[in-house]
Amino acid sequence: MSPPRPPLTTERRLGTGVVLRAGSTAPYRAVTIVEGEPHLVRGDVGAAGISAEGEARAGRAGSAAGRPGRPLLCLVHLTDLQLADVQSPTRFEFLNRYFADPRYAEIIPVQRPQEALTAHAVDAMLRTVKSLSGPATGAPLRLAVTTGDAIDNAQWNELQTVLALLDGGLVAPDSGGPRYEGVQSPGWPDDFFWKPDGDGPGGPDYFRREFGFPHHPGLLERALAEFRSGGLGIPWLSCFGNHEALHQGVGVMTSGITAALAGPRKPLALPDGFDHDRALELFTDHPEAFMAGPARTVTADPARQPVTRRDFVAAHFRPGARPAGHGFSAQNRLDGTAYYVHDTPAVRLIALDTSCPAGGAEGCLDRQQARWLRERLAEVHSAYRGPGGRAVSTGREDRLVVVFSHHGTDSLTNSRHDGPAGEPVLRGADVLALLHRFPNVVLWLNGHTHANAVRPRRDPADPARGFWEVTTCAIADWPCQTRLVELVDAGGYLAIVCTMVDHDTPPAPSSLETSDDLAALHRELAANAPLDGADSDLAGAPPDRNVELRLRPPFPLRHLAGE
């Protein structure tokens, strides 16, 4: 692990305008605001099919700002909040010491220096989003789409924090006893974690000693204090990810780990003689094996109960939820499933559940869900291709389709189990092949990787057609952003305008007294995190951020209702 040393410029937008730049060569760097990025026009899918007449009607080429066009849907994509119970007995933070060991590559990081502040960063983002409209069309935001890993360790108290933030209400990030009892406390016998309150028994911790992290006495007490959120203020749709389903997003929730979750014993290190070659296997199938080493006594908390998929879905049926169940249906509650459709006048949104209940961070799609997906797609197509390539006419009305899920194409690689009735699961290439049979699919939103990426997915049977896959970075990690998405009838083509958004807080905290200060500090710490900070590739390249994605319309868009 080495400090982030070279100067850098990391572009980011607040609505349509500002950018962050780390401004010195010191190990710990400040964040400042500079001019932002323009929207890049990408026509990688069927660009040759966009007519010059349509281009002229659409207005100024090369930038989405101020473009005339008919808005069809304006939404915000939020993903990977990873709101963690930072004192949970079953978060094995000590594994971060193995950051350089490839046997732990699919497990770490387990702890982030900024994570106690994440609730404030999410709250700041929600307050910012409420004030925005689409920069391309001026249309108001109608909907928020979340794509999983809103929580970190499949815990009930973490889920309550998420719902209080998004719906509005009292947010209570603390757990356990009246005082913080986690790895960042000065008395914790491990100097590998940033300890903002001061020196531990052995002096300054690793982050303060090696990276110049700041000294902020009282930070943890302030960060974990209750506060009230105003909520998102628009309807929002939920999604089930691997961190909702599994211990630390990887391990099966065994009876052993479930019993330890609400208990009073927090491990400090691996047990003697631990077999590092089996680390991932044990973490996945028997995570309680990591509880067997030396430990400390902490305050037990019955709110640290595991969340099943059924629990997760049922918790969204709260009074005043918009839409009811935040997308989940009454059938989901009965079946214990987490995939559904949500319709707007112009667009059908389809939520998929790509988590793998047999463990492992990567995703898959079972055949039962794939059959359901085919039926839901056929309902909004006048014509599509059958399994053998034969054209199928339905007589139904066409509607655009946006798919959203936690995992994207490249992370649908989990084959640890068969689906219901023992049928083999679908991986990324299988799902792509299915979606390409339905030409009204124009966009697939996902998260999981914590990195911005925008990829064209051309139809092999007709390369002039296809859809866009848009992966958005995590609010939990640098660059701590979310993404506005506008679907626009631009005359001769469909434009999907994507704009990165930062929470509207100062570039640096002036104190620890306000939630804005805590959110600003979260971002500053995330930028300086040695593994996943501003020197990583999580922000993506410019073509992965502010972009206008063009498609040849799959049918005449004039028939669709606008915003």
Image: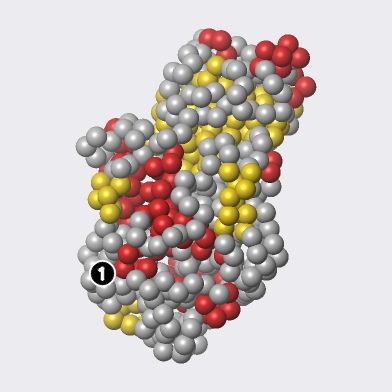
Residue 380, image x, y percentages: 50, 19
Residue at x 62% of width, y 59% of height: 22
Residue 69 location, quadrant: top right
- Is 348 left, or right, of 388 in this rendering? left
Residue 117, image x, y percentages: 40, 60
Measured along the vertical axis of the image, is residue 384 above or below residue 267? above
Residue at x 58% of width, y 54% of height: 32
Residue lying at the far front of the rendered structure: 510
Residue 317, image x, y percentages: 26, 39
Residue at x 69% of width, y 62% of height: 7
Measured along the vertical axis of the image, is residue 298 above or below residue 335? below
Which secondary structure, mark 1?
A: loop
Residue type, mark 1 in image: Gly
Q: Nearer the viewer, residue 14 or 152?
A: 14
Measured along the vertical axis of the image, is residue 177 above or below residue 59? below
Q: How many marks?
A: 1
Tell me the quarter of the image containing the N terminus.
bottom right
Q: Which residue is mark 1?
A: 176
Q: Residues within 10 Å of mark 1 (few under 14, many from 20)?
A: many
* Viewer can see residue 519: yes
